Image (spheres, helix red, strand yellow):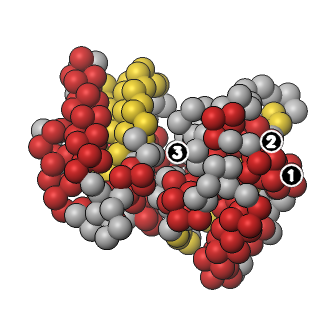
Amino acid sequence: MRLGVLDIGSNTVHLLVAEARPGGRPQAATSKRTTLRLMRYLEPDGAISEEGVRALESAVAEARRVADAESVDELLATATSAVREARNGAEVIARIEAALGQELQVLGGESEARFTFLAVRRWFGWSAGQILLFDIGGGSLELAIGSDELPDAAASVPLGAGRTTVEFLHDDPPGEEAVERLRAHARAVIAPVAERFAAEPRPDHVVGSSKAIRSLAKLAGYPMPGWSGIERMVLPRAALGSWIPRLARIPASARQELPGITPDRTFQIVAGAVVLHAAMTELKVDELEVSPWALREGVLLRYIESLSWG
């Protein structure tokens, strides 16, 4: 069976097409990504502007064309925080569904965390034990912890890399004072979650997923001994922290020259680094491992599982 997962996020509209069967590992066939950075289309009242909605419609229609060309048997379409929280969210969802030609599943923050946790669990396996997950999107930061396929605790906070760039890092480059304001805000928002998670058993593995974390790992991390490539990267908090002042002094146009920083991440990578460092600090994490699987794979795996038991 050929399945497609369309993830309409705060930063990108991303279609993943994979060959899948019950009991088997999904094999990616095609990936189509359109960078939108929806946060730049937010009006003062929190609505997505007409220009932003049209950009969404265009990206979604193109993803539909690709899915049809790839002979996808089933397209699983999801939307996350930017669409979910927009003041005109109901209208935006209706227009996306019209462009897509099908219904859209709008995920809540904790649902995002749970789908992503499932993907990470499947990637690392049962022997990984207790997992603590960090996932940074454009609009929100998801955290989850547990030893099973579903986390024992999950949280979503409004600390996405795109959102915090718009709210705190107004200049390019942003400057030290703006970075410190964001750092203080992020730690204050994360502190209650850290306190709740402290009641859970100490994690055997701390894992980061999402494109932002993979980019930061390429910049400041290292491959695990005996491995190569992003699939087994480690990102130390100390190394991440040492890069933040340097990233904040470099204009966005120059950041894409750095290892791992792609053009679609260059504007918001500073905020992503600050938020991730704050989260690692609050949860007393010295380093994390990178997972190549995240939300899209979790949605795909849950659908395959429903076929297995349906």
Q: Which of 28 and 215 is in front in this view?
A: 215
Q: What residue type is labelled 3?
A: Ala
Quickly name the residue at label 1: 242
Q: Position of residue 110 (x, y in %)?
A: 45, 66
Left-right relation of 93 to 181: left
What residue sits 42% from the left and 52% below the top? 40
Tell me where residue 66 appears, x and y as whole percent: 28, 22
Mark 2 or 3 closer to N-term? 2
Give the residue type that dot 2 points to.
Ala
Residue underneath mark 2: 220
The label shown at residue 43 is none
Quadrant (top left/top right/bottom left/bottom right) for the N terminus: top left
Q: Is residue 257 left or right of 77 when viewed as pictured? A: right
**Residue 294 got which mark?**
3
Q: Could you tell me which residue is drawn at 43 percent across and 65 percent down?
A: 109
- Callout 2: SS: helix
Q: What residue type is labelled 1?
A: Ser
